Image (cartoon, rainbow, N blue to C red):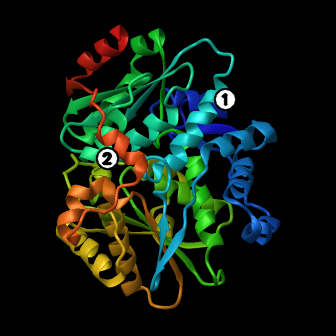
Amino acid sequence: MKLYSTKHISPDVDLKTAVLKGLPPDNGLYMPYEINELPPSFFEQLPNMSFNEMAFKVAKNIIGNFISDENLKEIIAESYDFDAPLVILDEIGVLELFQGPTLAFKDFGARFMGRLMGYFLKGNTDEVNILVATSGDTGSAVAHGFYKVPNIKVCILYPKDKVSDIQEKQFTTLGHNITAIEIDGTFDDCQALVKTAFLDEELNNKMTLSSANSINIARLIPQSFYYFWAYKQLENKSLPLNFCIPSGNFGNLTAGLFAKKMGLPIHKLIAATNSNDIFTKYLQTGNFAPRPSVSTISNAMDVGNPSNFYRVLDFYKNDFSLLKENIAAYSFDDEATAETIKFVFQKYNYEICPHTAVAYLGMKAYLKENLGESNNIILATAHPIKFGEIVEPIIGHTPEMPERLKSAIGSTKLSIPMKNDFSVFKNWLINK
């Protein structure tokens, strides 16, 4: 498996280098040269496959023979012991991606990546320092995915007062090889600190740095798995297939593009964003104009300069008309999001988080403009209890808290406060 940089300046690399390095030296993003279509036999056998059997075949199709079948199956088996059921609400199916240990879709990517990186580091005495910027769920998923993995230290940067209390507790209470840094700024500030660190020559000479954000290709490969799993659960697979993805850094949507390239018959991918509507305006105008993110109740999507936009652009070879033909986008404010949480609960007695509500709105907007029978799936990216302080006043009660969250809530926060200054962050990394 060979990968190139989207900036086409850095040399090509193999999967191990791409995963352990995270970003190319030219500050692009790694993309695989080939994403082959799965054979017809895969889709014929899919109805009888388990999740892990399906995940192995999809991963093998991308990775090829770079990892032995035995080791790849072991990585997948250790990553997934939870389901992603499809719940039907009239014309919309809700794919529940929050059944994992941290109650967020990012468990699918982070657990696979943690074990893949651990496999690559077997027998290696060198220490890898993983830098992660999070607007919410990435932090907890990565923290738990890499917790106590040998030879790996994880540093999670998050914006002060801009993640939910439960999200914060999930990644600031573990200790051991997990360190949380509370930046006085926005998610974009955190992401800029991480990217600057990767490009700093002195830092890279002193330590091995890598990323576990969706900028790392090892996060995107496993996120393609659940698109196929959703398709498996449909009764009538002959209808056009649409997915609506609550979108922030656009890694989830990029994984959908990987699935489509592998032959999943996706008709339309719909990006649903909150008031950070940079991508929606791009599709309207053809002009990509990043700006500072604004805070919303769907905070994990508060991204003003989505990194994976450049992978999406690269996927379509910078062809705006082709991109627009395959992807739709809609944006919604907090008021509409809150109203949707209430509507879904009152109509279906079904609880959704703010991000899932944005996806529901996006699918409804698309269906209003595109009549005709189809399979319509939204990605439910987080359990509503993770945003209990938002959801509770809207629906009139607090969502039930799963047992695996209760221990985190009672634990002591261990984060390090830090101002938004790269020199301060760099000195801390060198001296820690």
Residue 193, given in percent of the width and then of the height, sits at 31, 29
Local packing at callout 1 (Cα closer than 10 Å; few below 14, some 14-19, many 20+) is some
Which mark is nearer the camera, 1 or 2? Answer: 1
Q: Residue at x 21, y 74 (%)?
A: 339
Q: Residue at x 50, y 67 (%)?
A: 95
Q: Quadrant of the N terminus?
A: top right
Quarter of the view holding residue 428? top left
The amino acid type of the residue labelled 2 equals Asn
Residue tagged by mark 2?
A: 305
Q: Nearer the viewer, residue 404 or 86?
A: 404
Mark 1 or mark 2: which comes first in sequence? 1
Residue 66, given in percent of the width and then of the height, sits at 75, 36
Quarter of the view holding residue 345? bottom left
Local packing at callout 2 (Cα closer than 10 Å; few below 14, some 14-19, many 20+) is many
The answer to whether 430 is drawn above or below residue 274 in the figure is: above
The answer, for residue 69, to whether it is visible in the render is yes
Residue 189, given in percent of the width and then of the height, sits at 25, 35
